[in-house]
Amino acid sequence: MWPFDYIRRRKYGRRYKAALIVFLGAYMFERLDRDNKARVEAELSDNFNRTDTPAVAWMRVATWDLIAAFRAAAMDRIGIEPIIPGLSWTPLFKPWGFWRKLPEWPRRAFDARAAILIDEYRPMDQATADAKKFLRDNGMNIPDADPPAHGVTNVAA
């Protein structure tokens, strides 16, 4: 029975880290000052522009959780550490470290960690609830409900 316990524990750990990254990317970004927000958004756009799809198109179709994960990766690349003491981006992104730079062209490298880790994020999983509780216990204002999908303003129309 122990191999299944190991697999469950590993899956829980990956989902927990993915939830932490998504929520830190979303709600830590809101707490940054204007200059750091601009730096994160510039790095986010630069990373998106390293693909064959421009940043404007990414922002139009991406959901809030994917944008939050890419913002967290951008904060990692420019050196903005999480606001919770003792927490670092390096161990959080470790399961997806292989995807740090996906070469598109000889001079460009797209950081695909967020695009891969979003597959591990489960809004209704116990790991996500535990990640929210951890962040709330450390002073972050994490709402109970997730934000609406990016770009959706009026579904009735």
Image: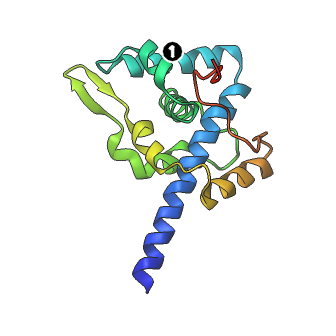
Q: Position of residue 73 (x, y in %)?
A: 49, 34
Q: Residues within 10 Å of mark 1 (few under 14, many from 20)?
A: few
Count of numbered circles on the image: 1
Which image quarter holds the C terminus? Answer: top right
Q: Is residue 156 above or below residue 101?
A: above
Most foreground residue, 82 or 132: 132
In the displayed image of the protein, which residue is found farthest to the front? 157
Residue drawn where x is 43% and y is 71% of the image: 7
Residue closest to the eye, 132 or 42: 132
- Picture coordinates of residue 113, whole percent (x, y): 41, 39
Question: Residue at image x 28%, y 18%?
Answer: 52
Residue at point 47% right, 30% down? 77
Point out residue 126 in the picture as x, y percentages from the top left corner: 63, 61
User: Where the N terminus falls, by quadrant?
Assistant: bottom left
Q: Is residue 22 left or right of residue 105?
A: right
Q: Is residue 43 visible?
A: no
Vertical arrangement, residue 69 with respect to residue 30, above or below? below
* Residue that appears at 44% across and 21% down: 58
Find disc 1 in the rendering and name its residue: 42
Q: Extreme left residue here?
A: 106
Residue 86 can be seen, yes or no: yes
Colouring used for the render:
rainbow
Question: In the image, residue 146 lies at what x, y percent?
Answer: 68, 39
What amino acid type should be assigned to the residue bearing mark 1? Ala
Q: 42 or 53, which lies in front?
A: 53
As drawn, which residue projects farthest toward the bottom? 1
SS class of the residue under badge 1?
helix
Side of 8 where 104 appears, left or right:
left
Which quarter of the picture shows residue 147?
Answer: top right
Which of these two is toward me, 126 or 139? 126
Q: In the image, 113: left or right of 41? A: left
